[in-house]
Every structure is written in C-alpha cells, then in structure tokens.
Amino acid sequence: MMKTTLLAFLLGLVSPVLNAQTSAASQTLPEFNFSESVFAGQMHWLASDYLAGRRTGSVGNEIAAQYIASQLRAYGYQPINGESFFQQVPLLKTAAPKSASLTVGKYDFTTDDNLLIMRGPAAAVEGNVIFANYGWVDAETDHNDYADLDVKGKIVIVRAGIPSDASQQGVFRGVKEKAEMAAAVGALALYEVYTLPFPWSNFKGYFGGERMGLDDGLPSATIPYGFLKPEENFLPDVQQSKKGLKGRAASTGMQVETILSQNVGGVIQGTDSTLKAEYVLMTAHFDHVGVGAQGGGAYTPVDSIFNGARDNAFGTISLLAAARAFSEVRPRRSIIILAVTGEEMGLLGSKHYAENPLVPLEETVFNFNTDGAGYNDTTAISLIGANRTGIDEQVAEGSAAFGLSVISDPSPEQGLYDRSDNVSFSAKGVPSLSFSPGFTEFNDEMMRYYHQVQDNPETINMAYLKKYCQAFTLSARLIADRDVRPVWTAGDKYEAAGKSLYGTKRP
C-alpha cells in the first residue's frame, strides 16, 4: 500500500501525460515489477571471469551472443535475420609487422622506437625520398598534391591529416585513403609525420597492437604505409633537398587474420495497426576489451580480466530487461532489439548493421542506445544527445517514475555522442541518442573502473541497476507509444541525413 501511494505521488509530480499513461497501469506494466535478483544474476554471468572480457572474436564474446539469443527466443521475439537471431559481422584482425625500418639520409627509424607501420605488404625498397605536402587528392575540390611531382619509384613523406583537417578525424581519414593515392602515382612507400597533440607512445601503443576493422572485401594497401616521429630537423632537410635524400624502407608486412563475430537481434510487432509499420531500434554493445595486454590498462597476475560490468554488461542487461517487458506488454510501435559486437574496436557491429540493415532504415524511426563508462550519481541517468530528437520529455518522465533525474550531456568535452553505437545510425539519418548511467564528470570514481580490471560484478550497485533498467524500459515505451515519430531538431548536423533517408515520410 505504501509503495503504491508513493508511486502515484511521483507520477503525479511528473505530468498529467505520464500519469494518464502509467499510473493506472503501474500494477500491470512489467517494468514496475522488475526483480533486482534477476539483474544481479545476469550481471554475475555476463561480467564473469568465465567470459574473459567478452573481446570481439573470442569464445567469451560468442558465449555472450548465444546467451542473448536464448533470452530473445524465450521472450518470443522473431529472429531478425530470416530464421536466425544472428547477423554475421566479417572482420579483419591486424597487427603491426614483426619488424620494419626506414632510413632517410642520416635519419633512421625503427618499430622499436620512432616508426609505426599501419598498413601494407612485406617489402624491401630503395629510392629517393620526396616530400608531397599532405599526399592528398580530392577531385571535388580539385586538390592534388601529386600534380606537379614525379613520385614514381620514390619513398614519399607527407604531413599528417588532410589539407582541410589535421585533427584526429582528418588523420584517421588519411589512414584509410592516402596509401592508395600514393600507390596510384607510383610511390614505393608512404610515411606521415606524426603531429597529433597527445603522446607518440600512446598513439604507437594503441595502433601498434592488435586492431580490428570491418572486412569490406577491398584489397589492403599495396605499399608500406605508416607514421614516423622524427627529429626536429628531419622535415626541413627532406623539403630542402633538391635531388632528394636517399632512402630504404623494409617491412615484414602486416599480420592479418580474417575472423567472424555477430550481432544478435530480434523483432516484436507493435499493437497499433498503423504505427506497427514503424520500428524503434534499441541497441547496446555486449563486447568488452578482453584479457591482459588486450585490455590496454593495468593488470596483474592475480587479476588480468577486464570484466566490463559497467561497460557494457550494464547496458546489455537493460536491453534484455526492455525486451522482456515489451514481450509481455507490447508498445504501439514495433521494436527491434539489437545487441551489437565490436563497439570497443570502433563501433564495428553497429556500422555493419547500418550498412546492411535487416529492417529497412527508412522504416526505423528512432535508435535508443544504452552504453556508459560507469556512474558516480545513482540518483540520475545521463542523456547523451539531449535536445536533439524531441524525446527528452519521455526520458524525463520515464526516469522520474523511478525516482531518477536526468543529467543532460555531461562532460561535453569528451564528445560522447559520437563515441557510441548511436552515431552509426545518426550518420545514416536515424534520430538517435544514448541513455547512460548517471555521472557528472569523468572523475576518479569513473576512471577507477573505466576499462579497468576492477570493473567486476561485485562492485555494482544492484539496486541502482534495477532502477536504471526500469527507467530505460519505460522511457523507451513512452517513445514507442508517441503519436508522432521523433525527428532531428532543426539545424542538427544529422538533419540533412534524416531528410535524405525519410524523404516525404515526415511525422
């Protein structure tokens, strides 16, 4: 009796809309009767040592995928991929060459110190060394750094990034495209001069280790390509040499392995005869970073498993909680539940689904993602992407029903919106955001667990996990039950992509 009175009071404080939708139904909506012990059990399984950090491509990751599929099957969801709950995600696992070197005049570079090979086959070449500005070709802007240069049979040195963007994003774009541009004009090898504003050792440590990317079937770079960290006089000497300094480049070639991982998904039809043709896509990534040196953080012989309780067993459990609740009381719109792999490797699973959707994206009206680095405020949830898609009211109402407030876009300097799986769908035009555990800043409480071996089930506030699952589920229900579909706020950077995707299909 006491709980019912308090719940009615909280609902009445939020708004008449929520009160009308949920107060009378509070005894029957499944999210109001979630069990903390169920979530605790799921947490102790998904973030257990047995799953060994759920690294993409590992046995632990595969076990987690099978577990999620078994839950969706038990809840009565239809398989998302014909008769299968799985979508295969083809990947390439790469590691730096076992050895590589570069000599330019009096300057020597080795992989033990100041050289990082990012792409390319085994090779041993000699030739003059030439500077080619950014080494960039863009037909749309008529920019061609090779237009007045003869680089055939030469080793090419360039600036990092692209002419319009020397930031991290520009550098990453160059990694994808520069080697092919240089090879097309006959270069023997290509190296960028490292200039990003964070330590070379961090950059080299990250990209010099095991990496994964989507296997798009396209050939890899045909020449050695990478980055070097030179002495101060190196670039002026290369630029000023009229004949070109003599150079030698050698590499044993990238270590490449083809692997398969998988997304896991199911679909349940909505109850509204019209709105059920529209789908709300709910996502969470179930992978983490693995064991030992794979994890990228400190570890010991006593504890070397990066369990990933907060990131993102927390979100995976929330996704399954919503899936179960919606199977018991269906929303008006149809629901896609999609647990994605490879987020920690670069949003790979969500990117693959966005490029190969199993339900057309033009029928997918919203992506409600859940992900987070952790929490330092158990009285709240965090909304990453507030005021962008028009659903803030539903999130506030769904959270308040369980005594949680909303923190809008904490730590904006971190660029969190573009760092989780929601952005794979935003880029295609689908209105998207991330629902995350409550935090105010990336302080010591957050960083103590983020990608650390300490992030294990024993440290989780299970009462907060239950409230979080409840708020996530009810917020999603209110969004799926709206009369009008979410849309991008005017002027949002993804608004044009939304108009292109949906055309005349407006709310």
Image (cartoon, rainbow, N blue to C red):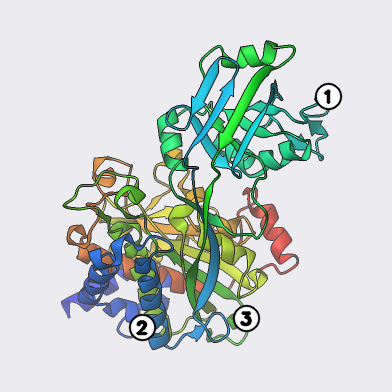
Image disc number at residue 277: 3
For the point 60% across and 75% down, the residue is 358
Crowding at mark 1 (Cα within 10 Å: few <14, some 14-19, many 20+): few
Residue 50 in view here: yes
Question: In terms of sequence position, does the residue under pointer 3 or pointer 2 come before the other?
Answer: 2
Crowding at mark 3 (Cα within 10 Å: few <14, some 14-19, many 20+): some
**Mark 3 and mark 2: Cα distance apart in space:** 25 Å
Query: Is residue 52 shown above or below 184?
Result: below
Q: Where is residue 334 in the image (x, y as percent from the top left)?
A: 54, 80
Image disc number at residue 25: 2
Does the residue at mark 1 contact the one at mark 3 (Cβ under 8 Å)?
A: no
In this view, the residue in front, 377 or 154, is: 154
What residue sits right under mark 1 in the picture?
A: 148
Front of the two marks 1 and 3: 1
Query: Is residue 448 shown above or below 227?
Result: below
In this view, the residue in front, 91 or 107, is: 107
> Amino acid under label 2?
Ala
For the point 43% across and 65% down, the residue is 284
**Mark 2 and mark 1: Cα distance apart in space:** 73 Å
> Amino acid under label 1?
Asp
Query: Is residue 368 shown above or below 213?
Result: below
Label 1: which secondary element: loop
Question: In terms of sequence position, does the residue under pointer 1 or pointer 3 come before the other?
Answer: 1
**Mark 1 and mark 3: Cα distance apart in space:** 56 Å
Q: Where is residue 78 in the image (x, y as percent from the top left)?
A: 51, 86
Label 2: which secondary element: loop
Residue 386 in view here: no
